Image (tube, helix red, strand yellow):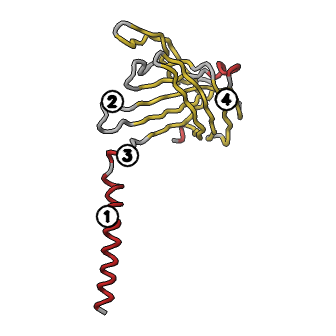
Amino acid sequence: MRFSWNINRLLGLVVLTGLVPVLSSCIFNNHTSRPPNTYACDFQTNAAIQADTALFHISPDSTITAYNFSVQSGSSLVFRYNHQKKAPDHARDAGFSETLVFRIPTDVKKFDYQDKNFSQADVFYQRSCACSISGAGFKVTSGLIRGERLSPVHWIIRVNVTVHTPDGDFHLKFNRPFYEKNLL
């Protein structure tokens, strides 16, 4: 009896010592893990995009004309995609966020905006980052935005656009579900 108890105890120690490095690497190894990405994909009914031009200072002696945009009440469906990435703890900046908004008529159940009819969607993009264009909004003039209504409160949206800015081009590509904002 004593012999089997020692074997069980020995097996337990072997298993425990094998698990300690695995558990500790998952819990304490934060310096090599990637910061989380968060996404918000929603739409509002009876909405509109209000966009005004503004001057943005991108350097001490240089400005650009870009957009400030917001979602207001109106007569369309307005979709909003927001992606935020937190910077690692040791980084000097605060990460970045990007927002894409566009609108469609309320009676549409399926849409496909591509280069020719892209301007009908009033598509705007904004990036906040440690960059010269932080906070400036840009009108997106080409690409693909496709969507299908799955229920009155649920859409599936596919986006593949390129945003042209003074800091270079940004490519945004996703295929995500969007839910009515009032329900979130």
CA gap between label 3 and label 2 equals: 17 Å
Q: Amino acid at mark 3?
A: Ser
Q: Position of residue 68 (x, y in %)?
A: 47, 17
Q: Are marks 4 and 2 in contact (CB under 8 Å)?
A: no
Front of the two marks 1 and 2 = 1
Lower position in the chain sequence, tag 3 or tag 1:
1
Q: Position of residue 34 (x, y in %)?
A: 39, 43
- Horizontal side of 144 relative to 167 (left or right) equals right
Q: Which mark is residue 20?
A: 1
Residue located at (50% from left, 17% from top): 165
CA gap between label 4 and label 3 equals: 43 Å
- Name the residue beneath numbered marker 4: 106
Q: Which mark is residue 93?
A: 2
Q: Position of residue 45 (x, y in %)?
A: 60, 31
Label 1: which secondary element: helix
- Horizontal side of 21 relative to 102 (left or right) equals left
Q: Are marks 3 and 1 in contact (CB under 8 Å)?
A: no
Label 2: which secondary element: loop
Quadrant containing the N terminus is bottom left
Q: Which mark is residue 131?
A: none
> Looking at the image, is 159 positioned above or below residue 141?
below
> Looking at the image, is 144 positioned above or below residue 64?
below
